[in-house]
Amino acid sequence: MSTTQAVLVETISKPQLRGLPSRKAPAAAERLNKIRGLASALMDEAKSLDHENGLAETSVAIENLNLKSRLDFFEEVQRFEVRLITRALEVTGGNQARAARLLGLGTTTLNYKIKAYEIATTA
C-alpha cells in the first residue's frame, strides 16, 4: 500500500462512523481498527486487479495482432515498461534501488526510465 493510501486509511475516524450503530468505547476502537484493516485490504485488492487488468489488455493486443491491424511496437514496449516499473516501485514501497534489483536493472537505468517515462514515485 502506498504512503498516500496508508494515510487515507488512517484518517478514518470515529466521527466518520457516526451513522453506524454505536458500541461501547473499547469495542468501538477495535471496530475502527477492523474497518481500517478492511479498507487497507480493499485498496490492495483494487491495486492487484488494476495490475491484472493491464496484463490482460496487453495479452488481448497481442492475441488480436494480424496482418490487417497495426501495432506501434515502441509504444507497446513503453506501456509495458511503465506498468512493470510502476508495479516494482509499488512492491518495494518506492525504494528505487530495491525495484532495480527486482527488475534486474542498474539503479541508473531505472532512474533514467522513471524520468524518461515521467513515472510518479512515492519517495
Image (tube, rainbow, N blue to C red):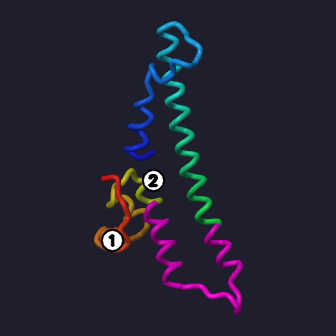
Task: Using the rendered view, name the quadrant where residue 22 is placed.
Answer: top right
Q: Residue at image x 53%, y 43%?
A: 43
Magenta segment includes 83 = yes
Q: Quadrant of the N terminus?
A: top left
- In the image, is 81 to the left or to the right of 45? left
Query: Which residue is at the front of the view, 28 or 84?
Result: 28
**What is the magenta segment's predominant secondary structure?**
helix
Q: Identify residue for label 1.
A: 106
Residue 33, relative to residue 46: is it above or below? above
Q: Identify residue for label 2.
A: 91
Residue 122 — which label?
none
Secondary structure state at the residue bearing disc 1: loop
| Separation (CA) of disc 1 from disc 2 | 17 Å
Q: For the view shown, which residue lies furthest in the top direction?
A: 24
Residue 88, relative to residue 21: is it above or below? below
Tell me the kind of residue under disc 1.
Gly
x, y (%) of residue 101? 38, 64
Q: Residue at image x 45%, y 28%?
A: 12
Q: Residue at image x 39%, y 44%?
A: 4
Query: Which residue is at the front of the view, 18 or 5?
Result: 18
Tell me the kind of residue under disc 2.
Val
Secondary structure state at the residue bearing disc 2: helix
From which residue to which does the magenta span run? 57-86
x, y (%) of residue 69? 67, 87
x, y (%) of residue 103? 43, 67
Magenta segment includes 102 = no
Q: Earlier in the sequence, mark 1 or mark 2?
A: 2
Q: For the view shown, which residue lies furthest in the bottom direction?
A: 67
Residue 108, relative to residue 122: is it above or below? below
